[in-house]
């Protein structure tokens, strides 16, 4: 899949141009859950606000409510020309996976709007699925993503060491990946970077007490930086406590610019280029 240079209209050109966008501030919300019922009454308006704010691309995370439905993100991406999707089984839903899940997931990786497998990983905070099941499902999805030549999108909560160990044991980093909603500090950031991953910052980076995350945000190299909302969760300041939505990703970008002593435009440019390079300029391997 060829990718237009940043100066081009990119996916929005196919939706009738960018007259409704802030023309000098292209943004990518690399992780949002717009399929959820919290958007059922105003989804189109939410998406329109994002475009007006300069969000040229949104990535619909396709974990939904878990198996057997694996197409939550694909359905949204098919409905909007400027939206892409992931497919995968969230660690919360690992116990729902069956033998039928894997051929279905594998078939969805070839969908033209599918750009990653995720979010996948380990969550020991809630333990909605047994930990051994989470680890097995995580490993299986890394195998599928590797075969498909797709990046992986990592969710980890209170399972850092096991997550890192699983990646080292099962992931071939040829397609790269994203640690989404990064909530670690400099030590964790260095581990992630050593493994070849991109780091995506959410609205948490705008919280005043998130000092470890602030320090991590300063050290991520320009070419590994991404931004996201994780909407409807974790709205940034000044919207904290409200339902999050993709338009608010600009506040995360603004805070990153402050922390990294650069401009909002530069953060928008870097994170958009990085997402395109990771998720669009890739070769699908079926070996």
Image (cartoon, rainbow, N blue to C red):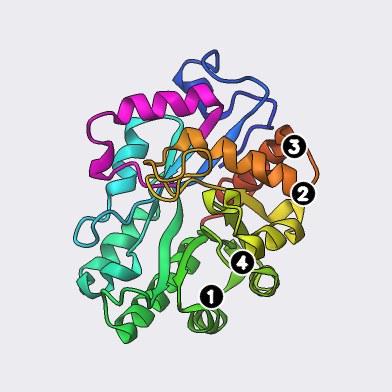
The circle on residue 139 is none
Q: Residue at x 49, y 83 (%)?
A: 162
In contact (CB < 8 Å): disc 2 and disc 3:
no
Residue 79 spot, x, y in % from top left: 32, 31
Residue 33 spot, x, y in % from top left: 36, 47
Q: Is residue 45 left or right of residue 101?
A: right
Q: Is residue 33 magenta?
A: yes
Is disc 1 placed on a helix, strand or loop?
loop
Is disc 3 placed on a helix, strand or loop?
helix
Of the numbered discs 3 and 4, the one sitting upstream in the chain is 4
**Eyeballing the image, is 129 above or below 69?**
below
Residue tagged 2: 260
Residue 277 spot, x, y in % from top left: 64, 47
Q: CA distance from mark 2 to mark 1?
A: 30 Å
- Give the class, few, some or many, for how many residues have Cα within 10 Å of label 3's Cα (few <14, many ≥20): some
Closer to us: mark 3 or mark 4? 3
Of the numbered discs 2 and 1, the one sitting upstream in the chain is 1
- Residue 144 appears in view: no
Of the numbered discs 1 and 3, the one sitting upstream in the chain is 1
**Which residues are the magenta region?**
32-57
**Eyeballing the image, is 235 above or below 40?**
below
Closer to us: mark 4 or mark 2? 2
- What quarter of the picture does the N terminus occupy? top right
In contact (CB < 8 Å): disc 3 and disc 4:
no
Q: Residue at x 50, y 21 (%)?
A: 52
Q: Residue at x 67, y 58 (%)?
A: 214
Residue tagged 1: 171
Residue tagged 4: 174
In contact (CB < 8 Å): disc 2 and disc 1:
no
Is disc 4 placed on a helix, strand or loop?
helix
């Amino acid at each position: 899949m060829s990718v237009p240079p940043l100066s081009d209209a990119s996916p929005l050109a196919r939706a009738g141009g960018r007259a409704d966008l802030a023309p000098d501030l292209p943004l990518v919300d690399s992780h949002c859950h717009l399929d959820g019922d919290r958007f059922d009454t105003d989804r189109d308006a939410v998406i329109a606000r994002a475009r007006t704010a300069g969000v040229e691309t949104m990535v619909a995370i396709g974990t939904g409510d878990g198996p057997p439905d694996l197409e939550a993100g694909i359905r949204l991406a098919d409905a909007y020309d400027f939206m892409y999707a992931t497919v995968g089984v969230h660690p919360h839903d690992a116990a729902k996976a069956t033998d039928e899940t894997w051929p279905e997931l594998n078939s969805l990786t070839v969908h033209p709007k599918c750009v990653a497998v995720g979010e996948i990983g380990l969550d020991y905070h809630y333990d909605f699925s047994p930990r051994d099941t989470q680890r097995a499902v995580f490993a299986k999805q890394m195998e599928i993503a590797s075969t498909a030549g797709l990046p992986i999108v990592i969710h980890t909560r209170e399972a850092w060491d096991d997550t890192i160990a699983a990646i080292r044991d099962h992931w071939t980093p040829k397609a790269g990946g994203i640690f989404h909603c990064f909530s670690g500090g400099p030590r964790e950031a260095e581990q992630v970077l050593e493994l070849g991953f991109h780091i995506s910052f959410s609205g948490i980076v705008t919280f005043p007490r998130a000092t470890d995350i602030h320090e991590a945000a300063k050290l991520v190299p320009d070419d590994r930086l991404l931004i996201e909302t994780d909407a409807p969760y974790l709205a940034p300041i000044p919207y904290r406590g409200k339902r999050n939505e993709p338009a608010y990703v600009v506040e995360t970008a603004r805070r990153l610019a402050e922390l990294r002593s650069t401009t909002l435009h530069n953060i928008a440019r870097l994170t958009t280029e990085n997402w395109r390079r990771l998720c669009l300029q890739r070769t699908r391997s079926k070996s």
